[in-house]
Structures are given as C-alpha cells and as structure tokens.
Image (tube, rainbow, N blue to C red):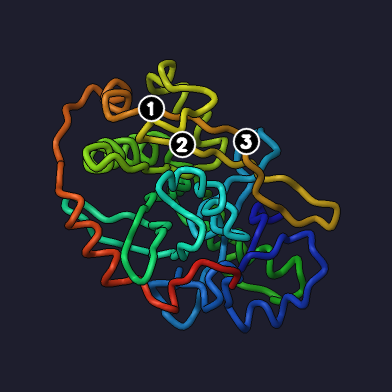
C-alpha cells in the first residue's frame, strides 16, 4: 500500500476523479500547476504533499505550500499587526528579499499604498531523504490511474531529514530575527506539530513562552493535520510559542548578526503591493 497520503492537495482516501487530477497537475493552494517537477521530465509535476512515516499515525507534510490551506496561517498572524487600523488594506506578499536572506511571506497593513505595519512568515516542512516517487506511482496504481509502472516496483525507501531540517531553519531564524527585532516587528515560523516536537526534544526550547506573548519578536505556530469525516485533512492550530532574538541564540548558541533599517524593508514591500496582492480568498 502506498504511503502517499495527499496528492495534488487531495487525500488518497477521498472519492475524486483522479485521472483528471493527475492530468491537470494543479495545486489547489496556489491555484496553478504544482511547481515540484521531475528533473528527468519537466512536463510531469510530482504533486506529493503529505506522506506517512514512522509509527505515529499522523501524516507528515513534505511540501511547504500545503501549509497555506485556506490561508489560515495568515489570518492566525493578524493579531501581530499591532499598528493595523480599521480602513487599512491587507496585502499578502511572497518571497521578499531583505539583507541576509529572503522571507517567504509578508502580511502587510497599508493605507493609500503606504506600508503601516507588517509581519513576516517563514514556512518549514520536513525534507525527505531519498525519493517519494515510487510511492506516488504505487498510489496511482491503487487508484486505477496507472496499469503498471516500473517505478512502483522499486524497493527504494524514503526517510525524513529531521536533524538537518530543524537546524537549518533555526539558523535561518537566528539571522532574520535580528532584523525584525531591531525594527520592532514580528517574525513567525510556521511548522507542523511533529517537526516542533522533534525540535523541542533536540534543542533547548524550555525558555520559549507557552502560550505566546504578543510582545515577543519571534513566534512559532505549530499546526496539526486533522482528519475530516470525508477522509480529507485540514490544518488546525496546535501550539503557539514565542521568544526573542536572545531566545533563538539560546537554542543554537550563536551570536546576533544582521540588522538593517526599517526603510529598506518598507521600500521593498511598497514596490510589491498592488491590487493583485490584496489579501483575500483564492
């Protein structure tokens, strides 16, 4: 039995027109074709969002785009826009470069095209070791989409790169939180609860505030995959933690580095906001 739980945003247990789904190769969270393509054949999108792994029955998300389902992670950050006022417009801007790196998303409060406040979001899911492709092909055979494929006979297994994933994102957060704290703004790391559980066990997380304090610069939002009656999965908030730049340094034993002026980020955001970035349903 295949260990792929969700393909192109649809749970394997759902009754769907799978042939059409596989032909369209569409990501329902982005509203366009899945960007994860096969290196050997760029015309084929992989589409694997979530997989089973280990003894824990809850599936593991392996695609960060899966986290933007229903845009819940963005609405769960609106309270951190402490300078937002009624009448301001909300914008969602992706992939904004700042000195020292790039931030996945910004939720921006703006009035008449001028940025009044913002909160940054970084999305992190688990990286796999090995390929999930044979499991994907097994699923398509089980669903009746494929009659047979050499890949589904492969004995190769995939694993989860727990340590590298956790340490890499914490190092990135350490660099970026210096900037946000200097600007008196908030940065949110969005993860699945299973990754948070690993990070809490392997790193020093005992000093993080639980529940989160709105005044802290660094927030960590963990979501759980909640199975619905129809076999699909929805994200549900599981835990909110918070700390500051010193707190992230305690996790890793690193020193503060990057600081930039508020005007640099504001200029980058104002150049990107437009009618197409207005925050709303797809």
Q: CA distance from mark 1 to mark 2?
A: 9 Å
* 23 over 128 or under it: above or below: below
The label nearer to you, 3 versus 1, is: 1
Residue 157 image offset from top left, x and y in percent: 53, 49
> Pointer 3: what residue?
238
Residue 47 image offset from top left, x and y in percent: 56, 67
Left-right relation of 54 to 142: left
Q: CA distance from mark 2 to mark 3?
A: 11 Å
> Pointer 1: what residue?
243
Name the secondary structure under disc 3.
strand
Q: Are marks 1 and 2 in contact (CB under 8 Å)?
A: yes
Q: Are marks 2 and 3 in contact (CB under 8 Å)?
A: no
Name the secondary structure under disc 2.
strand
> Pointer 2: what residue?
220
The mark nearer the N terminus, 2 or 3, is 2
Q: Quadrant of the N terminus?
A: bottom right
Few, some or many residues within 10 Å of mark 2 (<14, 14–19, 20+)? many
The mark nearer the N terminus, 3 or 1, is 3
Few, some or many residues within 10 Å of mark 1 (<14, 14–19, 20+)? many
């Amino acid at each position: 039995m295949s260990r792929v739980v969700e393909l192109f945003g649809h749970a394997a247990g759902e009754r769907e027109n799978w042939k059409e789904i596989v032909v369209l190769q569409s990501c329902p969270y982005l509203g366009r074709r899945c960007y994860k393509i096969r290196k050997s054949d760029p015309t084929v999108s992989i589409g694997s969002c979530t997989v089973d792994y280990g003894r824990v029955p809850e599936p593991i998300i392996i695609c960060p785009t899966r986290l933007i389902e229903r845009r819940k992670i963005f609405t769960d950050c609106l309270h951190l826009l402490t300078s937002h006022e009624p009448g301001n417009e909300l914008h969602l801007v992706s992939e904004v470069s700042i000195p020292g790196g790039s931030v996945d998303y910004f939720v921006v409060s703006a009035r008449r095209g001028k940025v009044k406040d913002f909160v940054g979001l970084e999305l992190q899911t688990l990286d796999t070791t090995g390929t999930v492709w044979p499991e994907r092909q097994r699923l398509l055979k089980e669903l009746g989409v494929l009659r047979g494929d050499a890949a589904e006979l492969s004995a190769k297994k995939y694993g989860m790169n727990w340590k590298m994933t956790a340490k890499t994102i914490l190092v990135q957060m350490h660099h970026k939180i210096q900037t946000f704290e200097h600007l008196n703004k908030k940065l949110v790391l969005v993860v699945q609860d299973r990754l948070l559980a690993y990070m809490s066990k392997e790193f020093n997380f005992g000093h993080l505030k639980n529940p989160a304090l709105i005044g802290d610069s660094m927030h960590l939002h963990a979501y759980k995959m909640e199975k619905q009656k129809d076999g699909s999965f929805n994200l549900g908030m599981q835990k909110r933690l918070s700390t500051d730049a010193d707190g992230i340094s305690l996790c890793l034993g690193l020193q503060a580095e990057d600081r930039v002026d508020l005007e640099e980020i504001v200029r980058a955001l104002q150049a990107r906001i437009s009618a197409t970035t207005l925050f709303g349903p797809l």
